[in-house]
Image (spheres, rainbow, N blue to C red):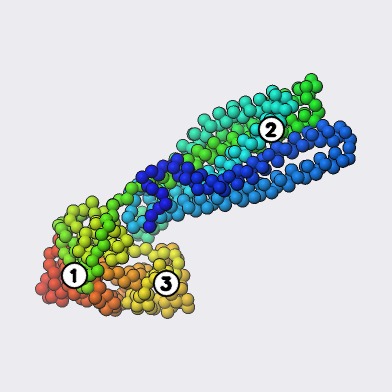
């Protein structure tokens, strides 16, 4: 899987330019329609002035009827151009936001992790709020252009009555935008900081929810709540600062717009009082002075939205431009995929070396849980090759030199904390819908009682994180998913710790039968799993201390007997 952008050149400005470029056609159509809307709105007070000037002056019923028909045409144009213009722009906006959400999700779901100093909650905020705000640029630019059209038409119309009125509108608009563009920069920077703090608060609450049970277990829930309250308080304070800046911006924009409208009205009144403009031109000027406040308000808000979109785009670039943690190779493992660990030194592992021949079932009994965790982290790729010494080989090829897709096809590591997803039992066992061994995996993992318990069977709904399943059911569901994948090399870490002894015995035998002829490594201290393995390796103090069959080790090694006896 790869993202549509080249990470080497992704910046916030690049994301905005890309959005504008690939939505150019929709934006052009939206600009024309919204420009037509603003032009028709501007034409309304101009038409009223002309009616007063000519139709009522001539007192002709024909001219009056023609005037009403012109007003009806203007109103119809306003209605339809707005409706279809906003429909085009909002469709393009939501489509672009969807593309950006998918881009961020694709980065997170790539086989090779990216070097991003962000927590999952922060990435979630970027994939939702920031994606939406970045896509707003699709609407902002056409609305900015159409507002400019309205201001220019008003200035030209007023200029035809009196050159000073037209120049006043143009000069006032330039002055208003100059003031507001300075204020918008502060809003953009503060909005970026607000999004960052909200994301950090979201990340913290996600961590707390994931660890809620252990927090309750040792009484740490109150301290955790205080920690979250502090993070949320920072986000609240920043949100208040942003709201204060937005309020100042909006208040200033309204005040300046009203000042310009008032100046136009007063100047037109003075000109009419001196008979320098006609009554119809006065009506037009007063109408335009009232109307021009709407496009001016819209026009003056655009710099703020542009700065917010830019701030969100910069945050998205943090994810999309992040380099991969490791650079994968291009080799493929041999078909008879065995597993070899060669002089690996990482964490508690000290020059660890062993091999699992192709088609064999090997178990590792780790005396220390940290050694087991470190070994599984290295095998799963959670630790990049550059972070440990030695090598891991699959099918005779180092994993660092293998193409990621080929490695994932040959090697599957199922950790003890595997996630359960919202969906059904079936989608958790077979997420891609292509597994051939679903029924066999259900039997082997002893999920048959769970399936039989519900009328929907494998289509029984599963809540997020398996909240409606017991601990043992979640563990068996995770094991079923690993077995259904039928990987040439399968690594399991403590797959039966949450089930009873009888079920554990049955699962152990089922795994050995289903995986016969396939390379399997189980990191466990379960006597049942150790007993069905072809060979048991004892991992003590970071090295392989002993090896043999489970029963031979029980008979000859008291330390081993005490470590695995239950």
Nearer the observer: mark 2 or 1; the answer is 2
Up the image or down, 129 lies above or below 523; here it is above
Q: CA distance from mark 2 to mark 3?
A: 64 Å
Query: Hey, which quadrant is residue 246 in on the image?
Result: top right
Relative to 174, 277 lies left or right: right
Where does label 3 land, which residue? 426
Q: CA distance from mark 2 to mark 1?
A: 83 Å
Relative to 445, 139 lies left or right: right
Q: Residue furthest left?
A: 556
Up the image or down, 227 lies above or below 493; here it is above
Is residue 167 visible in the rendered structure shown here? Answer: yes
Residue shown at 75% from the left, 36% from the top: 45
Where does label 1 land, which residue? 357
Mark 2 packing: few (<14 Cα in 10 Å), some, or many (20+)? many
Where does label 2 land, which residue? 154
Please state the horizontal and vertical placement of residue 492, each as a whole percent of the image.
27, 67
Give 296 or 463, whichever is nearer the viewer. Answer: 296
Up the image or down, 152 lies above or below 536; here it is above
Q: Secondary structure at mark 2?
A: helix
């Amino acid at each position: 899987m790869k993202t549509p952008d080249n990470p080497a050149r992704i910046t916030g400005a690049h994301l905005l330019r890309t959005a504008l470029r690939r939505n150019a056609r929709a934006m052009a159509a939206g600009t024309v329609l919204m420009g037509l809307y603003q032009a028709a709105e501007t034409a309304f007070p101009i038409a009223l002035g002309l009616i007063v000037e000519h139709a009522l002056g001539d007192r002709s019923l024909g001219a009056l009827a023609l005037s009403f028909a012109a007003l009806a045409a203007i109103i119809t144009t306003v209605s339809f151009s707005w409706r279809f213009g906003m429909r085009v722009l909002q469709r393009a906006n939501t489509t672009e936001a969807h593309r950006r959400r998918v881009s961020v999700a694709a980065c997170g779901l790539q086989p090779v992790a990216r070097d991003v100093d962000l927590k999952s909650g922060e990435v979630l905020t970027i994939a939702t709020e920031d994606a939406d705000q970045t896509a707003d640029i699709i609407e902002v630019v056409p609305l900015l252009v159409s507002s400019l059209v309205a201001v220019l038409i008003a200035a030209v119309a007023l200029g035809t009555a009196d050159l000073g009125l037209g120049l006043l509108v143009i000069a006032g608009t330039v002055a208003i935008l100059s003031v507001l563009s300075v204020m918008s920069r502060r809003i953009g920077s503060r909005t970026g900081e607000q999004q960052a703090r909200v994301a950090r608060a979201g990340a913290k609450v996600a961590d707390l929810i994931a660890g809620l049970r252990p927090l309750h277990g040792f009484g740490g829930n109150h301290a955790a709540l205080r920690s979250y309250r502090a993070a949320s308080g920072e986000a609240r304070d920043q949100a208040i600062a942003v709201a204060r800046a937005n309020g100042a911006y909006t208040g200033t924009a309204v005040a300046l717009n009203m000042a310009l409208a008032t100046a136009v009205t007063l100047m037109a009144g003075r000109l009419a009082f001196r008979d320098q403009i006609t009554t119809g031109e006065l009506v037009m000027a007063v109408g335009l002075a009232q109307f021009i406040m709407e496009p001016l308000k819209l026009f003056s808000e655009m710099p703020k939205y542009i700065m917010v979109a830019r701030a969100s785009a910069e945050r998205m670039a943090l994810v999309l431009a992040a380099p991969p943690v490791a650079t994968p190779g291009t080799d493929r493992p041999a078909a008879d995929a065995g597993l070899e660990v060669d002089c690996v030194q990482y964490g508690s592992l000290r020059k660890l070396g062993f091999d699992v021949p192709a088609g064999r079932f090997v178990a590792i009994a780790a005396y220390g849980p940290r050694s087991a965790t470190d070994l599984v982290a290295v095998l799963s790729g959670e630790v990049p090759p550059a972070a440990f010494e030695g090598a891991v080989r699959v099918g005779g090829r180092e994993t660092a030199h293998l193409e990621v897709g080929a490695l994932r096809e040959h090697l599957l590591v199922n950790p003890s904390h595997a996630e359960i997803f919202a969906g059904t039992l079936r989608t958790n066992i077979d997420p891609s819908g292509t597994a051939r061994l679903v029924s066999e995996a259900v039997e082997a993992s002893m999920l048959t009682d769970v399936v039989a318990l519900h009328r929907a069977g494998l289509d029984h709904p599963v809540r997020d994180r398996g909240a409606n399943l017991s601990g043992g059911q979640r563990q068996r569901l995770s094991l079923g998913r690993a077995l259904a994948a039928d990987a040439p090399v399968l690594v399991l870490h403590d797959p039966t710790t949450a089930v009873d002894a009888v079920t554990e015995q049955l699962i152990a035998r089922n795994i050995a039968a289903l995986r016969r002829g396939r390379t399997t490594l189980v990191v466990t201290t379960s006597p049942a799993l150790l007993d069905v393995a072809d060979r048991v390796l004892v991992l003590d103090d970071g090295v392989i201390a002993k090896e043999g069959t489970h029963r031979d080790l029980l008979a000859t090694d008291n330390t081993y007997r005490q470590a695995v006896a239950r």
